Image: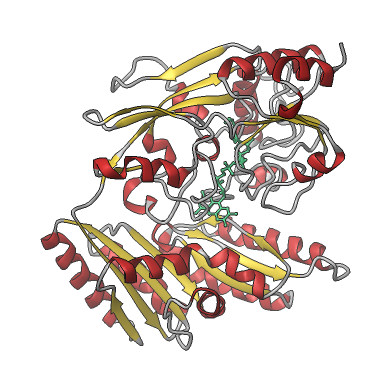
Amino acid sequence: MPLIEELVALLGPTSVRHHPLDRAVFSKDAGILKGEVIAAVLPETAQEVAAIVRIARRHDVPIVPRGAGTGLAGGAVPVDPGLLIVLTRLNRVHEVDEIGRTAWVGPGVINLDLSRQVEPLGLHFAPDPSSQQACTIGGNVATNAGGPHCLADGTTVAHVLAVEFVTAEGDIVTVGSEAPDQPGLDLRAVLVGSEGTLGIITKVLVRLTENAPDVATMLIGFPTIEGAAATVSGIIASGLIPAALEIMDQPMVEAVENFVHAGYPTDAGAVLLAEVTGTSESVAAGVEIIRSVAERHAPTDVRVATDDAERAILWKGRKSAFGAVAQVAPDYYLHDTVVPRTALVEVMSKIYEIGDRYDLTMLNVFHAGDGNLHPLVAFDSKEPGMLEKVQAAAREMVEVSIDAGGSLSGEHGIGHEKRDLMHLVFSDVDLDAQARVREAFDEAGMMNPSKVLPEGSRCFDASGVRL
Ligand SMILES: Cc1cc2nc3c(=O)[nH]c(=O)nc-3n(C[C@H](O)[C@H](O)[C@H](O)COP(=O)(O)OP(=O)(O)OC[C@H]3O[C@@H](n4cnc5c(N)ncnc54)[C@H](O)[C@@H]3O)c2cc1C
């Protein structure tokens, strides 16, 4: 039976989208890459996912898992024509253990919905990507997502206890468990951040975090971005790890302020959004530490939110930053690198120099506390040669980050976007080792091919001789 007919027989016609319009809609994620979708299928259970994988295998068709498609690295885009398995209908919170503070959730649960659902229990899911109103837990696990509050709490890998996934053979397997210190290899951690290349996540046991009794959110303006970055380094050097430390430069502050009207100081060279959580005593002490470190760098404005409404609007500004850029230009390319915190000032000045040299409109917003940079280039892709110029600048920005001891991606993953830059941080031996792990999970190479590892990564035979 032809592929589409077999899939329709399994799922019904409304769950198999292969009309040209559907295929076009599903051919992109939130990045700039466009792929080719044979069909997008929307299963509702892990058993259906397993059956789809077995059908795809019989037809020798590559598989690409997809959550909400908010990824920025082309991870959910079929580069080689492929079958897209969309997991958004596996969106049940199966079980919440209030005492153990864990929950089994479907991969299609939206990040913010999970936190809202467990809010009455005084709990939340700590990783909070800025896309949390739309992105899914499955996507978060597959990319090891970060977010403003991952500075103190750690990225997604620290909040996942077990993962149920469908293997490339179509079996349903669980790795990890509720019990701490599992013996054997930690395959749970291997699955987290695997970007759909090792299996399709169908259920996740997540750790839930207690809501802090008290919180203070501060917005501090500085004449220059260097002052804001030096304040971040000073705060960390003081021994305080705040819940969040986010920086926005002047062009980004202006775009956000026009969009959200959060009262951000548009005359400041940069703003630092800082948050401390804990008991009221520790929060008050944290605010004083941040204030005193900031004062060494000539702040133009220090504001502490006085209530939840003010706190919410300050965060709305930060979390709407990428949306705000739509007023500046029709397209944007968002970079994602990570550098040691001590290198923030040096790397930022090189990034501004690159932006100026390529004559690009650039806005910056970043998770400064963990050294995660997000230079965002606003442009019009209809302008001839513009995309190539943006991509050439992007490569230089990645290179200066790596030269400063940083890495390719702080949180968005490698996907297809940075696949061919992997050799900048990994040797042939490293890449071969990663390719072997991948082969162990997916011998036939049908799980999200052309992603993460560059062509030719598997380059040594069993005796260590180059293939
Ligand atoms: C405005 C905006 C702000 C963002 N802010 C942040 C941020 O602060 N931090 C951050 O980390 N990221 C951020 N991102 C990027 C993105 O939201 C995250 O990478 C998110 O985790 C992707 O989730 P998703 O459900 O949209 O996954 P998708 O984009 O659908 O997929 C992403 C990757 O995960 C794989 N995948 C998805 N679901 C599964 C599954 N069930 N099983 C196996 N593989 C799967 C896909 O194959 C792909 O490789 C932002 C994106 C936007 C557009």
Q: Residue at x 81, y 17 (%)?
A: 60
Residue 160 drawn at (x, y percent) = 40, 32
As drawn, the residue found furthest toward the left would be 281
Can residue 110 be seen? Answer: yes
Q: Quadrant of ligand 1?
A: top right
Residue nearest the viewer, comparing 413 with 210: 210
Residue 42 drawn at (x, y percent) = 67, 29
Q: Residue at x 70, y 20 (%)?
A: 11
Number of numbered discs on residues:
0
Residue 467 drawn at (x, y percent) = 77, 22
| Color theme of the render | secondary structure
Q: Which quarter of the figure is the N terminus placed in?
A: top right
Quadrant of the image occupied by residue 271:
bottom left
Q: Is residue 107 above or below residue 240?
A: above
Residue nearest the viewer, comparing 203 with 48: 48
Q: Is residue 414 above or below residue 354?
A: above
Q: Is residue 326 above or below residue 58?
A: below
Q: Residue at x 71, y 72 (%)?
A: 329
